[in-house]
Amino acid sequence: MMRRVVYSLLPIFAFSVLLYGWRSIVLTLTVFLFGVLAEYVFTKQKGKKVSEAVLVTCALYALSLPPAVPLWIAAVGIVFGVVFAKNIYGGFGRNIFNPAIAARLFVYVAFPDGLQRSFLQPWTPGSPWRFGFEVTADAGTAATPLMTMKDGIMPDLMDHILGFRIGSMGESSVILIVLAGIYLISTNTANWKIMLSTLVSFSAVISGLWFAGVVPNGGTVPIGLFESLFSGSILYIVVFMVTDPVSAPKKPGSQWAYGFLIGGVTAAIRIFSLFPEGVSFGVLLGNTFASLLDEWFPAAKKKAKKTPAKKTDTAPAAAGGVS
């Protein structure tokens, strides 16, 4: 299961290299180095080997970061996620929170200036290999779509679908993310109920607020559904992190409720808070209530197995023959 997730992330990583060049490779190697090292320190004490799960955590976390984030911030974040969101609970299978989400939220809250500046780096779609990493004072041409939409500047949807936009390394290409989701569902690696319920809830809240004319906090115009779906990391996190089998609920009913909770909270944070992106907070809140949701909802009923009726040779006996 873990390998399938890594396989599905490879095209997305390759696209990030196409967009951002060598920086994507350096950032990813840094995250893997410190993430695996942190895992090794804990597993060595128990006499165990480093699990493949930490590779998935590192890959998901690295691709959720902007390419120009300082490497030391990326390293601190993955160590926090592996240690305090996973191993402190007893390791793989016992963690309450998704380690990649916890790592991402930690650096966004602890180092907001570093993350904000890394999003405001100059970026030229036509020359990705000449990407520059010097901080620019002109944030208007380099801000993420979620930032510009609040100012009434709507993005080009086709560029968003194809992935030619600024943002985190793995969130841009809608096509690759959707294909990855289809692959994970078809191989029974990801739960489609959680994906669908999250997207339905998010879409319903965003559409309702748009029809009501609600303007995002700090914005000037309402934001429509397609602009919201194709901007930010909502699709990336729905496909790869919301469906985490360890931190998500296990019962069918609770999985639907879990997705509705995450989607609704994500939309509400995007509109009513100063954070342009709210999906990470939505997943963290969903992780918090996952066990409680499993307590509230009944387990799925198991279908009774039909046993073939035993054949009895009664006809000869009834006719006076030998039974």
Image: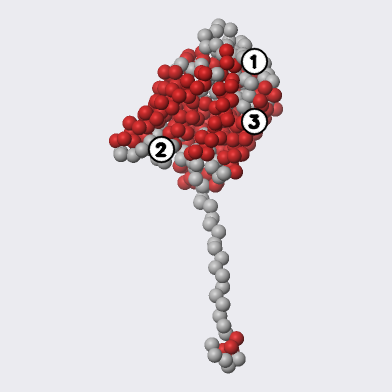
Mark 2 and mark 3 lie on one chain; the one further toward the N terminus is 2
Residue 51 — which label?
Answer: 2
For residue 15, which quarter of the picture? top right
Q: Looking at the image, how many numbered discs can be counted on the residues?
A: 3
Q: Assign the C terminus to one quadrant of the image.
A: bottom right
Compute the Cα span from label 1 to label 2.
39 Å
Disc 1 target residue: 126
In the image, what residue occupies the spot 55% across and 7% down? 136
Point 57% across, 13% down: residue: 130
Front of the two marks 3 and 1: 1
Residue 294 appears in the picture as rendered? yes
Colour mode of the rendering = secondary structure
User: x%, y% of residue 184?
Assistant: 57, 40
Which disc is residue 175 wearing? 3
- Give the residue displayed 57% in from the left and 85% down from the top: 314
Residue in front for this viewpoint, 151 or 64: 64
